[in-house]
Image (cartoon, rainbow, N blue to C red):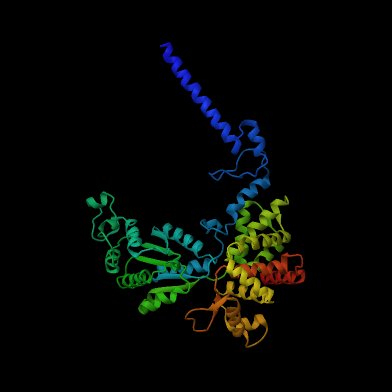
Amino acid sequence: MKGYRMGWQNWFSLRKKRFDALDQDHEDVVPRLSIGRNRDRQDDKLPKFQGTAGDQIRSTGKRTALDRVRFHMRNAFTPSQPVLSHRMFAGRTEVLKTLIRSIEDQRLHVVLYGDRGIGKTSLLHILAQLARDARYIVRYASCGEETHFSDLMRSIARDIPLLYHADYAPTSSEIENGRSLGDLLPEGTLTVPQISDLFSKVSNTRVLVILDEFDRAHSMAFRRSIAELIKNLSDRSSRLQLVIAGVGANLTELIEHIPSIRRNILGYQVPNMSNGEIEELIHNGEKICGLTFDREAIAFISAVAYGSPYIASLLSQHAGLAAVDREASMVEKRDVADAINHSVDEIRHRVSSLSLFQTGRAKADGHGTNLGLLARLALHYGGRLMPHQADEVIRKPGQGLAYMQKMQQDYGLLEPLADDPAGAYHFKEEGVPVYLWIELAQSHFAGEKSNTKLLDALLDKYAVAQNA
């Protein structure tokens, strides 16, 4: 027994020496991780996450009121994410009324379109919540390049309990076993008539299917199937309705494939927010983070955002952080100027290197201001640029179209909008207008050579509009 214990002791001793040698070799390449107090002293030199993975403020160290403000800023303004909460949703009351009236009273399907950053996804999430409050079954899906009609429809059918099928009694064994409409579908590829037949059987409830990012579904077969489904569901007075969003220019393609569906849909372009709605957005954020934006800061953000909720949220977030950095609880005009500088750097990384190169060439040739103003118009008018608008920008009546053609031919920044009867143009890359406008705002309002008189004029104009 003694020899047995000695054998194990020798084995552990040899194993320890072997690992010690390996550790020594490893330390020559990678320093050993420090532990205990030494590690704490090293970590003091590094920036730390302010919150935990459970979205709680970390209790380590001393926390000030401004630390809590910084922590809550992430939920106060979310430029990179849609608004999901009723209390954070600003404005759009009339838009929601129109959508609800179309769905509930007119039994229409809805096609919602507009530029990215205009708030379509936020609007859809709030619409979905309101529909659920009314006991609708709501199915939300984001489309992509690989979205297939069969897969999408099968997943929707699985979310509808068999209880709501007109041909099944509430006490049937299939319903008691928790089966869904998806269990009634055959294996393999599904056709539009099969789905139309199934959804026409929905009874004693209403179903709202929301298809976001429809423009990302490049398959013409998929789009045609959706168009045909809308026609069939409308003809059969189905209790399932579709809300399609993000289609932009694809709205025309959808209607042109089956012209008769025009009477079955509401095509609605999401408008820019008013100054009052932008102000509401900022005040909603104030309630969450605890900061206060003074009147000039709100006016400055509204003037630069020009109705874009994305730009307003982006500037508000950076301006709030700038105020916290200087240990202030009041956001001022200088904080918004700092926010513009940060935003330009952030947005620049989202633009392709080719577009950055071409905009650089255009600015070097003296077109920077005109392009910035065209970008501002594009952001305000759903991406469309009309020749008469370009006339006003370049201040040369009748030459706006030639100027946009020059921006297309010499720099590749603009192109004609496909199938537009009015001959409108748009920026070739969707991220370029935001970048050009924010950069122009930086040079005019936030840079070393900022035009304070022009800014003051904008703020005075905002004040007059608010008091009117």
Figure check: 458 above or below 183:
below
Tell me: 300 left or right of 86: right
Can you see residue 274?
A: no
> Considering the image in quadrants, where does the C terminus appear?
bottom right
Instruction: In the displayed orientation, state which residue is furthest to the bottom.
Output: 398
Which of 386 and 345 lies nearest the eye of the viewer? 345
Tell me: 132 left or right of 312: left
Q: Position of residue 126 (x, y in %)?
A: 48, 60
Can you see residue 86?
A: yes
Residue plotted at (72% across, 50% down): 327
Q: Position of residue 221 (x, y in %)?
A: 35, 70
Residue plotted at (59% across, 54% down): 76
Residue plotted at (37% across, 79% down): 259
Which of 173 and 38 lies nearest the eye of the viewer? 38
> Considering the image in quadrants, where does the N terminus appear?
top left
Which of 111 and 172 lies nearest the eye of the viewer? 111
- Please give the count of numbered marks on the rendered protein: 0
Which image quarter: residue 180?
A: bottom left
Which image quarter: residue 278?
A: bottom right
Q: Position of residue 164 (x, y in %)?
A: 30, 58
Q: Position of residue 462 (x, y in %)?
A: 68, 70
Figure check: 162 above or below 433:
above
Figure check: 394 above or below 118:
below
